[in-house]
Image (cartoon, grey):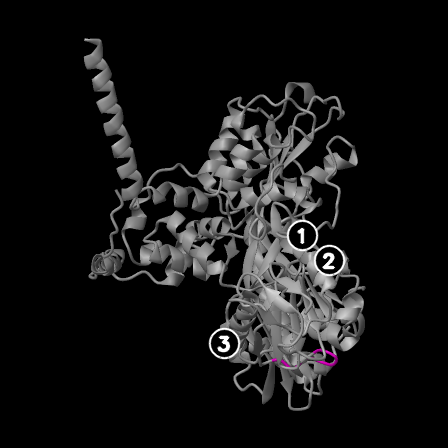
Amino acid sequence: MYVAVKGGERAIDNAHAWLAEERRGDPAVPALSIAQIREQMALAVNRVMAEGSLYDPDLAALAIKQARGDLIEAVFLIRAYRTTLPRLTASRPVDTGAMAVDRRVSATFKDLPGGQVLGPTFDYTHRLLDFALMAEGPSDTPSTPPVAESGPVAQRVPHVTSFLNRDGLIEAATPSDITPPDLTREPMELPATRPLRLQALTRGDEGFVLSMAYSTQRGYGRTHAFVGELRIGMVPVKVEIPELGFAVEIGEVELTECETVNQFKGSKTEPPQFTRGYGLVFGQSERKAIAMSLVDRALRWEELGEDFTGAPAQDEEFVLMHCDNIQATGFLEHIKLPHYVDFQAELELVRRLRTEAQAMQEAAE
Amino acid sequence: MTDAPHAARKSWMATLAKAPPARLQALMPDPPPHDLLRAPEVGAVMVQGRTGATGAPFNLGEMTVTRASVRLACGTVGHAWVQGRDKAHARRAALADALLQTDAAPATMTQIIAPLQAEAASEKAERAAKAAGTKVEFFTMVRGDNV
Amino acid sequence: MTLHADALSGGFTDAPTQSARAFRAVLEAMARPGTIHTVEGAAPPAPLSLAAGVALLTLADATTPMHLAGAADCQPVRDWVAFHIGAPLVSAEDADFALGTWAALQPVTRFKIGQPDYPDRSATLIVEVDRLTNHGPALTGPGIALVTWLSLPETAAFHANRALFPLGFDCLFTFGNRLAGLPRSTRVEKI
């Protein structure tokens, strides 16, 4: 039976009004400014930029405020906004070797040119709640960190993998200028190329990519990864200006880059050497960048002639079709919306089956 | 095309693009009369990275960008592409780009570009010094096989 | 390369409104093949018509490879496209949009017709004509109540293109400030 329903406008309007009030919370508590969110919730802002796939800290902060801190909802707002922007052009590929590093560590080489630079990291904190932060006011003004007497970090910090590359111990990353596929413009086609996989992973859900990476460490598609290098800092973005015919720096983005070095015993097609996994993410997003590089490496099994062990992280379709949290939440949450007609059909079916089952039982008795 | 012939213009355009909008406004309070050839337009640029830092390009994500093109009364044309969504920033940057191609170039250089560059350099140096402050100095412990 | 100043003018001055109006005109032209629509807002360099300029500003951007054919492939047009549209200029085989007179666009069989799973990955030809009236070959098919007529340059090529359906290229005919559409779904008959 089909029942046409209409209505609910008033209820929806009232729900929106209540949502606005709840978003604001207790009016006796001062409202958050966008600048406060941008400056003090910077890692949430970074996550929204990375998964929203749009670098604009003010907009990400606005999205977080509007979404009441629901980061996936904020990512949704950013994704919706970016569809309204004309795509002016693509940048030149960024040169992460020219990064002004805030942080740069290697788990494989202790003494490397440029040194181990810890940067503003949580790594050596004790994970004890700092109740001093609860007391608002001037107490939350940290002292300026001391600077080095030996002078600043070098302007250009070489990549760790370039040292291994010199000895031929690691696979080369051969430069090319092929125009990469863009999954925001063309539907994703499988099998995907590595550039397409990296685009999907860098905008993928941090939790999903993290869990996939963790599964490889626990043995589901093991890749024996070490963090060859992890670096965070500002990188200039250069764009070829059509009206000028040359490239100009139009700004800077903060990026986190992770290169893993993976033990590789060789295969039918490749000699024993180290192989690489790669992660590059907007903002200071260290966990995501490491996870991305592990999953990238796991997905490369075919190209490197490794065996497919059936591990989820090796399964390109599984990873790429499920890593996007906006696609996932859209499909997941739609089942709460009216399905009255679908369900009516189900109800009819179950009733009929029950009647039939009952009739058969009675006939048997 | 080599980078050399346009080095000066690239440098000032980069400086203007990266300038804090409020600072540029303070340095250029009275923009000269001009026509808009391209009214400030907000859009997105797809930022690309490279696989393994040096390999094949891939799409990393977009950034917001505003561009504008202006023509001064003398006919000189200026262009700007700047990060973010600030239309006034793009317009001022395009105006400064135009002025830097006219007789007003030396004054514009001293009054606008030089202070912006000095401020950017000092901010960068300050951050690099903080980073260097977190550089690890390893002390190798005496090991039996080294004695 | 620094563009000549003329290349920097002649774009939309109020892009959101003008492009929305132009898009509506192009949409109507394609949805109702044979109807002739007046457009405004562009002043492209010669030999482009105003309508061709409007169509390019509205439909093309940096992600749509474009082919300029014949006289349209001149420096002033290239510069204008670079500044206002940013579309990469490519050979006919790779183009999403192609612009030129019907003669210059020949042979039209070189343009993309899409793939069976993605028929949309085909070319749109913007054909500059020297007259655009509702006299000429008869058009029938989706978007046409009974029959309509359009001053097409020929019929054989459109016959062949219709036979490829759902693949094939689509056409916009431009003359002065007017344009008309001929999507691949339209049947063309000589009268």
Residue A279 visible in the current orientation: no
The relative height of residue A322 versus residue C77 in the rendered view (above or below) is above
Mark in front: 3 vs 1: 1
Residue A80 position within the rendered picture, expressed as x and y whole percent measured from the top left: 45, 57
Secondary structure, mark 1, is loop
Point 70% across, 69% down: residue: B10
Q: Nearer the viewer, residue B92 or A270?
A: A270
Disc on the earlier residue, 3 or 2: 3
Disc on the earlier residue, 3 or 1: 3
Tell me: A72 left or right of A82.
left
Residue B138 position within the rendered picture, expressed as x and y whole percent measured from the top left: 60, 36
The part of the chain drawn in magenta is: C42-48
Disc number at residue C111?
Answer: 2
Amino acid type indicated by mark 2: Phe
Give the chain letter at badge 3: C
The relative height of residue B104 versus residue A348 in the rendered view (above or below) is below
Image quarter (top left, top right, bottom left or bottom right) of the C terminus of chain A: top left
How far is the residue under mark 3 from the one under mark 2?
32 Å
Tell me: B20 left or right of A141.
right
Q: Residues within 10 Å of mark 3 (few under 14, many from 20)?
A: few
* Magenta span dominant secondary structure: loop
Amino acid type indicated by mark 3: Thr
The relative height of residue B84 versus residue C50 in the rendered view (above or below) is above
Badge 3 is on which residue? Answer: C17
Q: Residue A34 lies in what quarter of the image?
A: bottom left
Point 54% across, 27% down: residue: A216
